[in-house]
Image: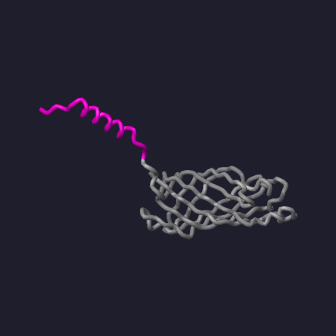
Amino acid sequence: MRRISAAGCALLLAGGALVATAAPAAALTLVTCTGTTTVNFSPGVTNTPRSVAVSGQDVADTCLSLTHPHLTDFVGPFSGTATQSCTTLFGNGSGTETLHWNNGTTSTWNYTNSFANVNGTKVGTSTGPLSAGTLAGAQVTQSITFVNLDLSACSTPAGLTQISGTDTWTITGP
């Protein structure tokens, strides 16, 4: 029988402690996408807060994935009602959206979002899990930028009725 010295025993214990306290692995990027978002308001958004119907569509026209190469694009229609004004256009909120993938499958996304004004541009982030369907359990982060908003329409009776912007999606999983 071979004996381990006290120094060797301490080294083995220290090595075990390092393994036990190692940081968890980073989430694996499953799919990345780029595309556009179009948002419609009815009635149009003005400088006075009022309840408006919000509808539109996320279109991811280019998706890349090493783990799911068959997922190349999706469309995500959305709708709801919100109190909006041009001075508080978008804020923090939450919702559910169904992503319709190119291969005929869907993913249900439960998201929360926040928007900020950055030098006259609306910049937003939406995050949350895919709760059902393709890639269920994965986490989605959408970054969206609405540039060159025609805020002069906010001063008209018709108001601002549509905006569009570019966005990116990152879908990660364990």
Q: Nearer the viewer, residue 105 or 146?
A: 146
Asked whether 23 falls inside the magenta stretch, the response is yes
Q: Nearer the viewer, residue 159 or 119?
A: 119
The residue lying at 79 percent from left, 57 percent from top is 86
Can you give x and y, in whole percent of width and height, for residue 68 in the image? 44, 63
Q: Residue furthest top?
A: 6
Magenta stretch? 1-24
Can you give x and y, in whole percent of width and height, for residue 25 in the image? 42, 48
For residue 6, what is the image quadrant? top left
Q: Is residue 21 above or below residue 173?
A: above
Can you give x and y, in whole percent of width and height, for residue 49 in the image? 82, 53
Asked whether 116 falls inside the magenta stretch, the response is no
Task: Name the image quarter holding the N terminus.
Answer: top left
Q: Is residue 134 left or right of residue 143?
A: left
Q: Nearer the viewer, residue 8 or 130?
A: 8
The residue lying at 30 percent from left, 34 percent from top is 13
Question: What color scheme is it?
Answer: one colour
The residue lying at 68 percent from left, 64 percent from top is 56
Q: Is residue 136 left or right of residue 57?
A: left
Query: What secondary structure is the stretch in magenta mostly built from?
Result: helix
Can you give x and y, in whole percent of width and height, for residue 96 in the image? 61, 54
